[in-house]
Image: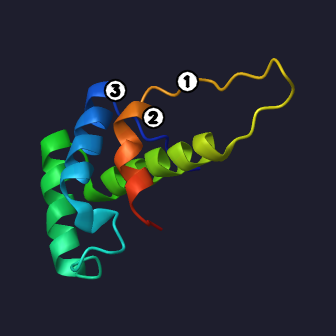
Amino acid sequence: MASKLVFSPSEDEILIQEVQANSILYDLADANYKNIIMKDSIWTEISLKIGKSVDDTKKRWKNIRDSYSKNKRKPGTGSAATKKKWNFAPHLGFLDRVEYE
C-alpha cells in the first residue's frame, strides 16, 4: 500500500511558486522542455527548498496539476450547483496560458 503524500499548505505554495518560475517543468512550448538533465536539476532544487524527496515533490506537483485540471473541467449539475472553491486554484492560473501534459 502506497503511503499518502503529506505536504503542508505552505510547502504546496512553495512548490507552486517554484514550478511557476520554471516553465521548463510544465510548458510544452519551452525550448528546454525535453531537457531531462535541466528538469532533474530544477526538481532537485525545489525538493531541497521544500525538504521532501524529488519523487514525492514530483508526485505532489502532478497531483496538484491534475486536481486543478479536474476542478476546472467539472461541470455543475442543476441550477443550484456551485463549484467547490479549491484553495490553490487562484495560484495556478499560469497553467491556463500554456499547453501542458
Location of residue 35 by image quarter: bottom left
82 shown above or below 88: above
Q: Nearer the viewer, residue 101 or 95?
A: 95
Q: Secondary structure at mark 1?
A: loop
Q: Is residue 48 left or right of residue 43?
A: left
First-in-chain label (3 vs 1): 3
* Inter-mark Cα distance, 2 to 3: 13 Å
How many C-alpha atoms fall within 10 Å of the one at disc 3: few (<14), some, or many (≥20)? few
**Do the CB atoms of the residues marked 2 and 1 lie less than 8 Å apart?**
yes
How many C-alpha atoms fall within 10 Å of the one at disc 2: few (<14), some, or many (≥20)? some
Q: Which mark is residue 9?
A: 3
Identify the residue at horizontal 13%, vertical 43% (top origin). Answer: 49
Q: Is residue 32 left or right of residue 56?
A: left
Three-letter amino acid code at the position of disc 2:
Ala
Which residue bears the numbered disc 2? 89
Rendered location of residue 29, percent (x, y): 32, 75
Q: Which mark is residue 85?
A: 1
Q: Is residue 79 visible?
A: yes
